[in-house]
Image: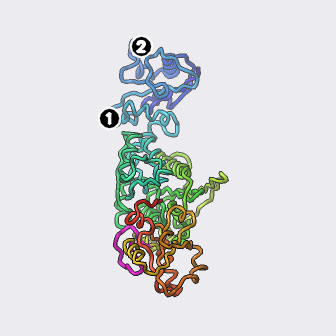
């Protein structure tokens, strides 16, 4: 039988530097005997004077410890020799017996080995967003043995998350995502340390959070946070693993900190608000985040291990419907405002303003002009005030939930420029969308076109469901 024997770093000097070799043997004992015949200097490190295996040496066949030298081996088996080592003298000393079994498939890889697994154990990786992308990222980082995994998310688990966010179960609904994720990751691997940041990442806290990590992975679904993470990684000189998904398409790239290229080199400016919907607004095939998130985890592991060729300087594009992959080269933009030759962004900015979106995470705003609360709208409907209630979402969203019973009419945001002249300028108009972001944009557009008696529903139909009609489906 052909058997591969793996030697730890501490014993390689007695085997002419060999890390592994293939021997023919029928039992584990025969393989070890052949090993010391080929490298006689190994004998005293493995066997006592009476020929017994020394007590400080363990031998594993595949991922299980052998029962004795007489244990039979099969063709293609791997024997891994694990000696005890004085504190700090070598990577193997850091691992407990169950960890050796857990990571056996890694340790047998020449590109990983003991040294690589120790790198993973010492690594600190931050995942921004514990959603569709963050779920596979976190699970695979934990399974791989990444020692410290940070999670940033301020949201709670919702029923609509479970279609794609495989980190969570039905029993987790209502829990903070970072808390549920921490329990899940510890269930996968109790040896990892999970640090939770139940906050919204902002310009005020981003640098303080990111500075403690070696690699940052983007699992976000909005442009302000994405530009914030990019700029913070450049300022801190941290590798940034980017991923994004939309319906049936995904993108993956690695950005290399100060040396670039960075996300701004790829997309200098964000699209106008509402042009590219989030997953909640535009939908996504549930399995797609698993594909893209797994690739992000792969790139992060390659960065930590220092092996292979990462996607730095490249972007991978995936079309799930055609199963077509494309790879494009990325070049650093010398005039990039953050990683260029003469950067103009030397500290974090207001990313909500940069991306032209309203901050809908707070209950109070500095400018309440043009907003109507769900309670105020309900009162006006009940008193019979003349209103033109306009739903500016997409038709598929209307079919999930709508205010049609209260006289609402569907005019999608993209159709609004062509249809708004059908509306009565002398009668009050109330716009609504899912959360208030698109309706805010529509409000500004209509006012610029001369409509004065127009407002929008704060928090959108989601707020209406939460505050007025709990029986209404949310998404």
Which residue lies at the image location 55% right of the left edge and 18% below the top edge?
Answer: 25
Q: Nearer the viewer, residue 150 or 415?
A: 415
Sequence order check, earlier mark of 2 and 1: 2
Tell me if residue 420 can be seen.
yes
| Residue 409 percent location from the top left of the image | 54, 73
Relative to residue 114, is residue 133 depicted above or below? below
Closer to us: 229 or 304: 229
Circle 2 SS class: loop
List x then y, in percent, for residue 457: 43, 73
Q: Which residue is mark 2?
A: 51
Q: Which residue is mark 1?
A: 87
Q: Which mark is residue 144?
A: none
> What colour scheme governs how the chains and residues are painted in the rendered image of this protein?
rainbow
**CA neighbours of label 2 inside 10 A, class few (<14), some (14 to 19), many (20+):** few
Q: Which residues are magenta?
A: 358-373
Mark 2 to mark 1: distance in Å?
27 Å
Q: Residue 98 location in percent, x, y?
A: 39, 31
Report if residue 215 lies within the magenta region. no
Residue, far left? 87
Q: From the image, which quarter does the N terminus lie in?
A: top right
């Amino acid at each position: 039988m052909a058997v591969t024997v793996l030697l730890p770093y501490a014993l390689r000097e007695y085997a002419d530097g060999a890390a592994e070799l293939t021997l023919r043997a029928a039992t584990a004992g025969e393989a070890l005997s052949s090993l010391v015949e080929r490298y006689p200097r190994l004998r005293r490190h493995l066997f006592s004077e009476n020929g017994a295996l020394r007590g400080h040496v363990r031998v594993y066949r595949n991922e299980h410890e052998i029962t004795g030298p007489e244990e039979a081996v099969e063709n293609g088996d791997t024997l891994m020799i694990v000696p005890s080592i004085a504190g700090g003298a070598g990577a193997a000393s850091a691992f407990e017996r169950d960890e050796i079994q857990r990571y056996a498939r890694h340790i047998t890889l020449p590109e990983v080995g003991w040294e690589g697994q120790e790198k993973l154990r010492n690594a600190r990786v931050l995942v921004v967003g514990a959603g569709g992308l963050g779920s596979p990222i976190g699970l695979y980082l934990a399974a791989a043995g990444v020692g410290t995994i940070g999670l940033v998310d301020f949201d709670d688990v919702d029923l609509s998350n479970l279609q794609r966010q495989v980190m969570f179960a039905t029993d987790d609904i209502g829990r903070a995502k970072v808390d549920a994720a921490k329990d899940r990751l510890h269930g996968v691997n109790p040896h990892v340390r999970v640090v939770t940041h139940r906050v919204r990442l902002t310009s005020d806290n981003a640098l303080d959070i990111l500075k403690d990590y070696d690699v940052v992975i983007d699992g976000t679904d909005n442009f302000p946070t994405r530009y914030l993470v990019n700029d913070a990684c450049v300022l801190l000189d941290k590798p940034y693993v980017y991923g994004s998904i939309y319906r049936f398409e995904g993108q993956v790239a690695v950005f290399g900190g100060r040396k670039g290229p960075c996300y701004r080199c790829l997309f200098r400016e964000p699209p106008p608000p509402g042009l590219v919907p989030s997953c909640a607004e535009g939908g996504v095939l549930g399995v797609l985040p698993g594909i893209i998130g797994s690739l992000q985890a792969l790139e992060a592991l390659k960065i930590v291990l220092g092996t292979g060729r990462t996607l730095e300087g490249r972007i991978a594009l995936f079309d799930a419907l055609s199963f077509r992959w494309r790879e494009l080269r990325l070049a650093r933009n010398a005039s990039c405002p953050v990683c260029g030759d003469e950067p103009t962004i030397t500290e974090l900015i207001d990313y909500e303003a940069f991306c032209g979106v309203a901050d809908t995470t707070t209950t109070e705003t500095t400018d309440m002009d043009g907003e109507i609360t769900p309670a105020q709208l309900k009162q006006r409907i009940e008193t019979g005030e003349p209103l033109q209630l306009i739903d500016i979402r997409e038709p598929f969203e209307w079919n999930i939930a709508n205010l049609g019973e209260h006289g609402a009419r569907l005019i999608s945001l993209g159709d609004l420029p062509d249809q708004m002249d059908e509306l009565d300028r002398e009668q009050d108009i109330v716009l609504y969308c899912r959360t208030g972001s698109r309706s805010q944009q529509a409000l500004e557009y209509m006012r610029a076109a001369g409509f004065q008696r127009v407002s929008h529903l704060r928090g959108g139909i989601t707020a209406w469901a939460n505050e007025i009609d709990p029986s209404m489906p949310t998404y």
